[in-house]
Amino acid sequence: MMKKITELPEVFLSDKELSVTVSRMVKSGTVRKIGPKIYTRNTADQLEAVVARNLWPIVGLLMPGAVISHRTAFENRAAPDGSVFVSGRYPRQIKLAGITLRQVKGYGPVAGDMPYMGSLFLASRPRAFLENLLPSRQSDKVAKTVGREDVERRLADMLRISGEAVVNELRDQARAIAPVLGLNDQFQILDSLIAALMRSRPAELSAPVARAYAAGEPYDPNRLPLFEALFAALRAAPLPKRLDHAAEPPAFHHAAFFDAYFSNYIEGTDFPVDQAIRIVFEREMPADRPADAHDVLGTYRLAASQDEMCRTPRDFDDFLALLKQRHAVILESRPDKLPGQFKTTDNRAGATMFVARDLVKGTLRQGFGMLQALDAPFARALFTMFLVAEVHPFMDGNGRMARLMMNAELIVAGQCRLFIPSVFRNEYIGSLKRLTNHADPEAFLRVMGTAQEFVSRIDFADLHDARRQLDACNAFADPAEDIKLRMPQSR
């Protein structure tokens, strides 16, 4: 019998055959009781940890044949208070270490419910949507449903990621099982929500992302936490106010040249700086790379225009117009990249997928709403830059557009523009990735502050002297080399 005990899994159910042996082992401390008739051979770890990693085997042992339902069918884990909801023949509750199993009286498996972990069933997605539209009282413990607003958000996510065909299929499946489950009223609610999201019938919606869909301007909700993190950091941080010492020609034009040069370098348009000078100031177009040369020239035309760089958006429509007008100038030599038009296909960079084409306008609007609440020029500049870069509204030229929009916010306020020297590219890209992947803006603020301080110390009165100053600070060095950016002496 002892051999049989040792061969049992970490968590097991006692029965008549094992009861005497299990009682003896509990007294000796070699087995611990978890709940009614359920034990563990693990005597080292905390019971909460044992229960958490064996959650579904435990539910299957204690409630065989039950259907994982209501909010748990959506979340597939315990609720914040440790509740796990299943449907069975009668209501009951079992408390374990850190977990409370709550069986509600409900129907067993129906069409679409899937066998799960041997003795359980997992409610189908249509059933989960219907059950989570049930009214649920919330007192001292978590409600058994996620509530209507969360259902709206999930439907909007499904529509955004999977499309209308999948949502219509969900509705058809829910229509078929609703009478079986006695959830006809909940189906009517579900049907009205889907119709509102698809703009075929009006209905009152609560979730912001769902209301945006119904209004015909859906957005990517995954980007909002990133915008919010940057917004909060910009509101809280002490921000620099560096005056623009290159506000008048020719210094303005010389600073604009290096702005355009380095901005294109970041995107892979790598010309020797002397050749770039000839392209911009002598209109010497290289026969082998005319489109690349026009990219640099187009960026310079905008960056060197004091009228253009003093234009900032009055409202959201103006913001969109500025984006498109400036993009048309930068990429005028690349008609295949749709200059002045938002992207018509989704785009990505490596593993990073940018905002889907259908969500561009709505996501820009959400971010612009936050931008309007920022008043410090440096804060507005950085937020604008990240907003455009993160949404990536165009097929190409998004980084250059983001940096131009950023510098306009600085220049119109009489503050020093900033650009990213070649040798500083990796720090810049890394800070953006940190913000995108981890909602951590700290490195981004630090890198952009360093870049602006660097630019503010360069004297742009003479083009060639400015070039020598930048060279002395390793600005043109390859970022792959073990060379660091040197900060110039203060002016």
Image: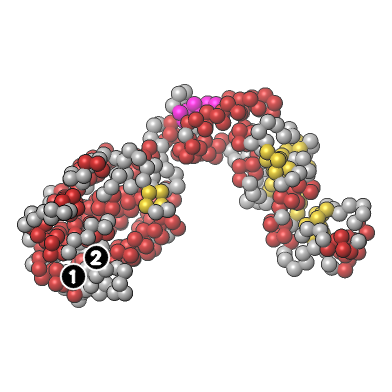
Q: Is residue 338 magenta?
A: no
How far across and how far down the image is residue 427, in percent? 33, 65
Residue 421's disc is 2
Tell me the CA gap for discs 1 and 2.
9 Å
First along the sequence among labels 1 and 2:
2
Q: Secondary structure at mark 2?
A: loop
Which of the 4 image quarters holds residue 430? Answer: bottom left
Residue 179's disc is none
* Amino acid at dot 1: Leu
139 or 416, nearer to the observer: 416
Q: Residue shown at 52%/36% (left/top)?
A: 155
Does the residue at mark 1 contact the one at mark 2 (Cβ under 8 Å)?
A: yes
Q: Main secondary structure of the magenta part?
A: helix
Q: Residue shown at 18%/72% (left/top)?
A: 471
The vertical placement of 444 against 59, above or below, is below
Q: Residue shown at 28%/47% (left/top)?
A: 396
Q: How many marks?
A: 2
In the picture, measured across the screen, residue 27 lies left or right of residue 478, that is right
How far across and how far down the image is residue 201, in percent? 47, 23
How far across and how far down the image is residue 353, in percent? 41, 48
Q: Which residue is labeled 1 in the image?
A: 470
Bounds of the magenta segment: 190-198
Name the residue at the front extreme. 288
Quarter of the image with the C terminus in it: bottom left
